[in-house]
Image (tube, rainbow, N blue to C red):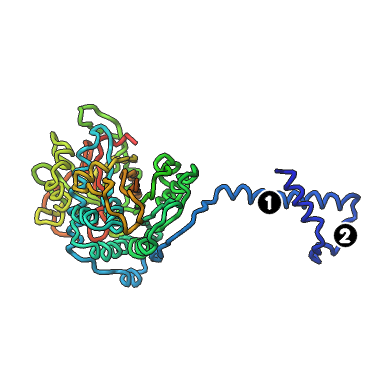
Amino acid sequence: MFRKLHKEANNYMESDKPLKESTVKKPLNIKGSKKVFKIAAIIVVIGIILSKFLLRGNRININTIAKPIYPKKIGFEDFDEQVKRREDIDENFLKELGKFSIKSSSLVLSKTDKDINSLYSPISLYMALSMTAETAKGETQEEILQVLNMDSIDMVRSETGKLFRKLYYHNEIGKLSLGNSLWLNKDVRFNINTLDLLAKDYYASSFSLDFNDNESSKKISKWVSNQIGGKLENRYDDFSLNQDDVMALVSTIYFYDEWVDRFNINDTKEDEFYLEDGNIVKSDFMNMKYGSHSFVGVDGYTVSHLNLKNNGRMIFILPDEGLSPFDIISDPQLLDEAINSLSTDKRKMGEVIFKIPKFKFSSKLKLKDICEELGIKEIFQETSDFTSLSDTKPLFISDITQSSTISIDEKGVEATAYTKIDYTGAAQPNGRAEMILNRPFIFVITGVEGSPLFIGIINNPNIE
């Protein structure tokens, strides 16, 4: 290869292109200077050509079929632009989205391992299933809509776009970005109208790939990594493809925000965390005390929250001693009551002491069986109708998975997830609450309008 590069460089140097005037103003009065100059120039040209070869390997050569136009960035203090972007979302849509989130969260997390930490993003699964519904017809579509609690695909299409824009922010404080994509087998013919619709109303990019090329999985992995802040890199096995696959649908979420009131790092101290099996582990706990803050203390659990700068919040649900997070998680009604208790008449204002373990972990969930339990079954059958997407037969979904990661520290919260679907105030103090999270607990991260972004369980803060 270097012989070829040397030849290219020689050809370049021996061409009759004139040198710039500044280059020939004063001839070098050194013996052999011409030869030295030529060698140096050859080295420079070889470097330029070689760099092109090296950089070529890092490029993602993907044939883009449809591409969305994302909302523009708005400064954290640019209130006028923030007001312009606000759209009213159908209250019934938000209510039904909340029901889906609670029901699916209860089902997903109640089946997770009690010895590890678990994280689930209901909004990511909702986005993936809503796009799946858009590619389906007839009973296949109706079944998905029924599980999502939505009256029609028109409602899903209209309100999902509004939700995307309302949740989205990207400023100097933080970022909440939803990313959707379809990875299409280049040997299959797809309905371009459906792909354009998904780009317009669901902000979904469509890419054509060679599913026989081993490098294709790396291209999907790279795109996902770029969407979620570089987290979960090099997870090529998560995106493996084979020639029988028709399409992979991927929905991502990246969330970062800062606490309104940061924890003082000097107040972070090591202390004990009591595991459910009776063992004790040491963990670093962040500490803060509010003189007047909202909380709920009822028989069974205590709830409070911390505000985030971009209008989100992180809710903490601490079961009473002797109870497990799974006692709450496994009961959808009880979980719903706990998450929303701060907006009911059970809410009090008083002194709240926070003692929260720092944690960082990743989670991976298989969601195909969960979707079947929820009532989505037709999409996994060869009789499913995805003719809105392609006339290829048979065309059905073979698997649904979700991977996620989260970390919290004194500054704020960072959380990511991707779902992959394979086709083949203040008031007078009234009481006191201690959010001493030194035993297994539940956490919830919500966005604007209380939209549930992430729900998880901490069984051991030291497990990553």
Q: Does dot 2 land on a helix, a strand or a loop? A: loop
Rendering coords of residue 195 (x, y %) = 38, 61
Examine the image and state in which quarter residue 399 appears: top left
Q: Does dot 1 land on a helix, a strand or a loop? A: helix
Q: What residue type is labelled 1?
A: Ile
Q: Which mark's residue is nearer the viewer, 2 or 1? A: 1
Q: Which of 13 and 193 lies nearest the eye of the viewer?
A: 193
Q: Name the residue under label 1.
A: 49
Q: Give the mark, 2 or 1, whose residue is nearer the N terminus.
A: 2
Task: Write the residue at 29% across / 69% down.
Answer: 86
Q: Which of 445 and 45 lies nearest the eye of the viewer?
A: 45
Task: Write the residue at 83% across / 49% down.
Answer: 36
In the rendered image, the quadrant that contains the C terminus is top left
Rendering coords of residue 367 (x, y %) = 27, 43
Q: How far is mark 2 from mark 1, CA to CA?
A: 28 Å
Q: What residue type is labelled 2?
A: Pro
**Residue 171 in sight in this render:** yes
User: Eyeballing the image, is 425 above or below 360?
Assistant: below
Task: Write the residue at 18% across / 61% down.
Answer: 151
In the rendered image, the quadrant that contains the N terminus is top right
Q: Which of 58 and 262 lies nearest the eye of the viewer?
A: 58
Q: Mark 2 points at which residue?
A: 27
User: Eyeballing the image, is 161 above or below 121?
Assistant: below
Is residue 137 left or right of 37 when viewed as pictured? Answer: left
| Neighbour tally class for label 2: few under 14, some 14-19, many 20 plus, Cα within 10 Å | few
